[in-house]
Image (cartoon, rainbow, N blue to C red):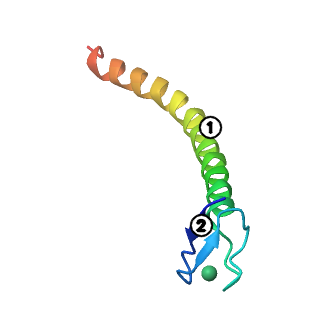
Amino acid sequence: MALIQCSECSNQVSSEAKICPHCGFKLRKIRDSKLAKDTKAGLGKGKEWLVYISVPLAIFLCRFVFHILFRD
Ligand SMILES: [Zn+2]
């Protein structure tokens, strides 16, 4: 068991503690895992959207460029 510093009130808190006993701030361990999860989910969604958009767009652009280049 180690002591960490509360990022809110700067007091020493047990790394086992889920919230700071001094100010009630939710400690980093929980906050980071939640943040990572949210970020991961957000990125996954973003990527999916990008694939759905970029594939037809790439095909369209290729056809457009070929049409311009080999028109004559
Ligand atoms: Zn605190």
| Type of amino acid under label 2 | Leu
Mark 2 neighbour class, 10 Å CA radius: few under 14, some 14 to 19, many 20 or more: few
In this rendering, the answer to whether 71 lies above or below 16 is: above
Image quarter where the N terminus lies is bottom right
In this rendering, the answer to whether 67 lies above or below 43 is: above
Say whether mark 1 is within 8 Å of ligand 1.
Answer: no
Instruction: State if disc 1 and disc 2 touch (CB < 8 Å).
Output: no
The residue tagged 2 is 3
What residue appears at the point 52 percent right and 80 percent down from the top-left corner?
Answer: 10
Task: Find residue 21 and name its label.
Answer: none
The residue tagged 1 is 48
In this rendering, the answer to whether 50 lies above or below 42 is: above
Q: Quadrant of ligand 1?
A: bottom right
Cα separation, mark 2 vs mark 1, equals 41 Å
Mark 2 or 1, closer to the camera:
2
Say which of 11 and 34 sits in front.
11
Position of 64 compared to 13: left or right? Answer: left
Q: Quadrant of residue 7?
A: bottom right
